[in-house]
Image: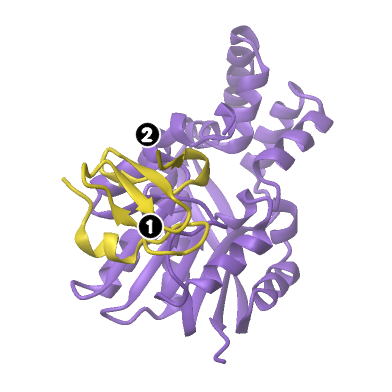
Chain colours: A yellow, B purple
Amino acid sequence: MAISKDLLEILVCPICKTPVELMQDENGLRCPACRLVYPIRDDIPVMLVDEARKEG
Amino acid sequence: MQSWKSYDSVAATHERLSAGLLFEPPAREMIGALEIPPGARTLDVGTGTGVAALIAKEKVGEAGIVAAIDPSLVMLRVARGKGIDRVVHAVAPGIPFRDGLFDRVFANFVISHIADAESALLDMVRVLRPGGRLGVTAWTDEQDPPRKLWQEVADSFVQPDRWREALQAALPSEDRYTDPVQLEQALAGAGLDSVTVRRVENIMRVDREDFLAMREASTQTRFLRSNLDEDQWNRFREQAREALAKNFPERMEHRRSAWIAVGVKRVG
């Protein structure tokens, strides 16, 4: 099961509210403004600031 | 999150007993008061095992959306298993949706858990469209006789000030929102008009063992357990069971009353 397309369309970064983008490997959601990547665990987006990693 | 404050360990009991008996009847009242039209976009904040979200799903139909957020990944998996497929691991404040996206936003017994409940409410109102409705529920401070008795036994195992400390940590806004006036002011302060607060009472028939299991899944008991060693914990359970058996029938009446608060987001 993948994250539904309509959910991806409405998700934004919890910090700056910029729409997030699915990473190419589909393992994370990237905020282009904050340059943070939010993980996806068990097909559930983890939109928690503490869990995000700086884009490297 | 500290382990005793997390719902991860009690998701199964919560789902088997508390979700249907304790949380669903008030959720149904709240969803009813929100008058959700078919096709609406809705958000369940602190969905837990998806109790309120599932009721909303009946209302919005195929054309609508029910999105759900929760700080417990374990709970979200249960909610997804029940048919809530748009689940997101997130908290309020920090809701990962854009301004004005939703027609209805609701939080079933959630705001008492949030230290900065005012910011959480503001964030819920942010994602609501002007004219959209927000609904929240909170327990009253009434305790029925079985609950009072259970608490007396629990109090004999843990000092009162330790209780207060723990509840303050786990349910930092509980004291405020057992008061309907403060609840109404909180919603008005977050930018809602036409705020109504209504009391509903839920009368349950439960077996003694199920009552105990429901109490054991509660925040208070998770705290109690984390403070007692194995022997003390077993003694506590035995004493609670005996006290209930002495005072109430095997199948007993358990009443919980709640506040249903609803408001409309100001236009302009």
Q: Residues within 10 Å of mark 1 (few under 14, many from 20)?
A: many
Q: Nearer the viewer, residue B81 or B205?
A: B81
Q: For the residue marked with disc 1, what is the amino acid?
A: Ala
User: How many labels were placed on the picture?
Assistant: 2
Mark 2 secondary-structure assignment = helix
Q: Are marks 2 and 1 on the same chain?
A: yes
Q: For the residue marked with disc 2, what is the amino acid?
A: Ala
Q: Is residue B2 positioned above or below B61 on the image?
A: above
Residue B98 percent location from the top left of the image: 43, 69
Q: Nearer the viewer, residue B180 or A39?
A: A39
* Residue in view at x 79 percent, y 29 percent: B162
Q: Is residue A24 left or right of residue B142?
A: left
Label 1, on which residue?
Answer: B68
C-alpha span from label 2 to label 1? 19 Å
Q: Is residue B210 positioned above or below B227 on the image?
A: below
Label 2, on which residue?
Answer: B12
Please give the chain letter of the residue carrying mark 2. Answer: B
Q: Is residue B167 left or right of residue B81?
A: right
Q: Are marks 2 and 1 in contact (CB under 8 Å)?
A: no
Q: Residues within 10 Å of mark 2 (few under 14, many from 20)?
A: some
Residue B66 percent location from the top left of the image: 32, 65
Residue B13 percent location from the top left of the image: 41, 34
Please give the chain letter of the residue carrying mark 1. Answer: B
Mark 1 secondary-structure assignment = strand
Residue B258 visible in image: no
Residue B130 percent location from the top left of the image: 49, 85
Q: Is residue B168 left or right of residue B127?
A: right
* Residue in view at x 66 percent, y 58 percent: B117
* Residue in view at x 42 percent, y 54 percent: B69
Disc nearest the viewer among 2 and 1: 1
Q: Nearer the viewer, residue B123 or B172?
A: B123
